[in-house]
Structure formats: structure tokens, C-alpha cells
Amino acid sequence: MERPSGRLRCTGEDSLDLLNRLSTNALMDLPTGSGAHTVLTSNKGRIVDVIFVLRQADHLLLLTGGGNEARVAEWIDFYTIIEDTEVEDITSDTTAMSLMGPSAATLLDSLAGPDAAPAENEDAAEVAIDGVHATTIRRDVGAIPAFDLIAPGTDGPALREAVTDAGACPVGRSVVELARVEQGVPAFGAELSEAYNPLEAGLQHMVSYTKGCYIGQEVIARLTTYDKVQKRLVRLAWPADAGVDPGSKLMLDGRQAGVVTSAIRDPRTGNGAGLGYVRKALIDAGAHLTSADGSSVDVAGPA
Amino acid sequence: MVVAREKPKPLTISISPEAAEHVRHFARMSGKPDSHLRVGVKGGGCSGLTYVLDLVDEFPEDDKIVEEHGLRLGVDRKSYVFLAGTILEYSGGLNGKGFVFNNPNARTSCGCGTSFGV
């Protein structure tokens, strides 16, 4: 399956330090072969993108939101002044696919040898699959094990053939989207945008409060200290006949209580599922809201 | 207390007499009395850009050099556009901030004054 992402290669001895100063997570202690998700934030503490930073032997591999690689490269380049850092967009030169599901690690090990599948989330390994060299990165989708395979672009067909021959079932974007929504994982362009901050998006685990300054740090520290986060990302559910789309307003007692950011129909039940931002008081499972057309939308719990 | 604010000449970087004296003091304390002050800007910090101060034995070839109050000041060339018109001052005392960049290009600054946005 394909998980939307852009890919950047960052070289230069100041790259990790620069990214540490531009984003929310603590990156300086990343060992080679490990990565971390971190949030690029504006000086207002709003989300520019969530990126995955993988430390490799002589460079950093960055995974950005799907289609956002040029913007992220531009963002990093803007803040590269005195630093020894170069950013190269390698999205079109590389291919990326993901093995996802409870058997993904076993399948990967059967293809590339024992221990090919990293045991820890956000760890990586260099593997060879039918002669194709690939970087595999464990990036679970919520509770679902998932492994990205990144290889030179020309090796895409061979890699795809190898994993399907080994028993992987190719699935389309709608299946990936359903898994993402069910697991409450925010996506660039839907839940992740400059309309929201990392605390609203449930990305506290990507925010370091001890590493020092980064762009937007003062705003995020203030939001935390004074408990000023007004809304939170939640999982939503609605019946099959409800008219709910991304952008639909969610109402409670005649007042807007939130907004839908992702909406998908579950083919197993016919019901709708989605993600959205609601007022902080409504994040626990069971809150009953209505969409603008009067359809019932329930909060299924925090994302 | 910030003192000796002077109007800078356009597109130059100035240093106040107090700041120059403190640079010399820190150079002596660091065991490098003949070193020079180098200033620049790096990405990051609360507001997006952060000032960098360093003592160096010699400047990189393409630095812009300013001489004032007996001090040679090197400015990283790529940083110059963010610093043109800046006066480097010194804020002393118990609540002082140390070296302070009075930068006309800064549209926003963070609370501690080491970071700015343009």
C-alpha cells in the first residue's frame, strides 16, 4: 500500500541541530538508524507539517506530509543561514510503499532475512529484497504495525512484485484512509495545518518541554502552562444515511461545537467514520453532536 | 539597563562603547585577548531566527568587517541582510540581558530577546 509522504534528503553537519531548533521534538540524541516524528511549527505555534526525521550515517532522511515536500524544503531553506545544511527533494527519485498489518513484520523478515523488520516504532534498517536495496522504517499507524519501504524510484516495480509475491495484499488509498481514521492518526492537509496547533492535534508526545527554544515554543509553553487548549482532535462516528463531509460543522444546543476534518464510509458496516476537532469539554466518548443537516454525529473518543 | 543607543548609519552594524568593552573583557577572560567578535544569525528560536555571537581568531574570507571603538566585528555575509542597521549593545546589572541586538529588521522578538522574526 502507499502512504502519502514526501521525501527530503538533508546533508551538512548542522542539519540535525537546525531541525531541532525548527521543530517541537528533541532530536539531538537520535542514534544513527533511529528516527522521530516532530512538528514544524510557525512562530504562532501552528502546524506547518509533521515530519519524520531519520538519522542515517551521513545524512538525514525526512518524510513530510503527502505533497508538502516542496513547502517543507522551502521552510528549512528559509531558516538555513549560517548553518551547513542542504536540502534535496528526492520524492520523485525514490519509491515508497508500506507494509501494514499484524503479519507485516513476519512478511518483511521472510523477504529480507531475520530482524529486517525493526522491533521498535520509529527505528529503521537497511534491507535487500530480491536484489533491491531499501530503507525500511517502522512507522505504526496507531496500534497497527506498519513498515515503510523506501528505495530508488526505478526499483519500484521490482519491490512491489517481490512483496506481493510474498503474500502482501495490495490495497488502495481508501483502505489506508480507513485504518488511519479508525486509529485516530491525523494527516497533513486534513487535521494537520496552520489552522491548528500540536496540542489540539493530540501530538503532545512529539513536543519536548525541556530541550530549549524552537519556533513557536513560547506559544506552546504558554498554552500548556495556562491550560489554554480550547479544542481537541477526536474520532467521530455517524450512521450510514448522515450527510457528513470534511468541513461539516458540528453543532450542540444550536452552537457550533466543532468541525469534521476527515470523513470516510466503512464498507464493512456502511456507517461513517471520521476525525474532527471539538471543544475540549466534549472529547470523551459519548458526546452527541449534530451535523449542519441535522444528522447525528457521535464522539467516539480522543484521537 | 540598555544604554548608549545611537542611530545607526544605514546598512551598517554598530556596537556601543559598553558592548565593545564587554567583548574585550570576555575575550580576556576566555584567554583569547586578541580574538575578534563575529556575529550572525541562525534558524530557530522562539521567533524563527536566533542571534549568534562568537569569538574567533580570524574571520572567514567573505565576512563583512566593521571596526568601531577599537574592536573588529565580523558579520556572516548571509546573515547581514537580517542584521543591517543593528546596534549591538550591552545590558548590565542583576536583571540585565547581556548583549542586546537592537535590530530594526526584527518585527517580532521572543521574551528573552535572543530570537527574532522578520
Image (spheres, coloured by chain):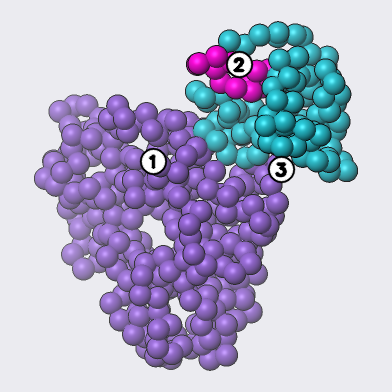
Chain colours: A purple, B cyan
Q: Chain of mark 1?
A: A
Query: Crowding near pointer 2: few (<14 within 10 Å), some, many (20+)?
Result: some
Tell me which residue sits at (27%, 65%) in the image: A143
Residue type at mark 3 is Ile
Where disc 2 sits, the SS reads: strand
Q: Is residue A186 above or below residue B78?
A: below
Query: Crowding near pointer 1: few (<14 within 10 Å), some, many (20+)?
Result: some
Q: Position of residue B21 (x, y in %)?
A: 73, 19
Q: Is residue A175 above or below residue B27?
A: below
Q: Is residue B42 above or below residue A134?
A: above
- Residue B91 within the segment the image draws in magenta: yes
Magenta span? B89-102
Q: Disc 2 marks which residue?
A: B91
Q: Name the side, left or right, on which B84 lies relative to A214.
A: right
Q: Name the side, left or right, on which A241 lies relative to B102.
A: left
Q: Position of residue A205 (x, y in %)?
A: 34, 50
Residue type at mark 2 is Ser
Q: Nearer the viewer, mark 3 or mark 2?
A: 2
Q: Nearer the viewer, mark 2 or mark 1?
A: 2
Q: Disc 1 marks which residue?
A: A209
- Residue B75 within the segment the image draws in magenta: no
Where disc 3 sits, the SS reads: loop
Instruction: Give residue A82's mark.
Output: 3
Q: Which of the 4 image quadrants contains residue B31?
A: top right
| Residue B8 visible at all | yes
Q: CA distance from mark 3 to mark 1?
A: 26 Å
Q: Are marks 2 and 1 on the same chain?
A: no
Q: CA distance from mark 2 to mark 1?
A: 28 Å
Tell me which residue sits at (51%, 82%) in the image: A127
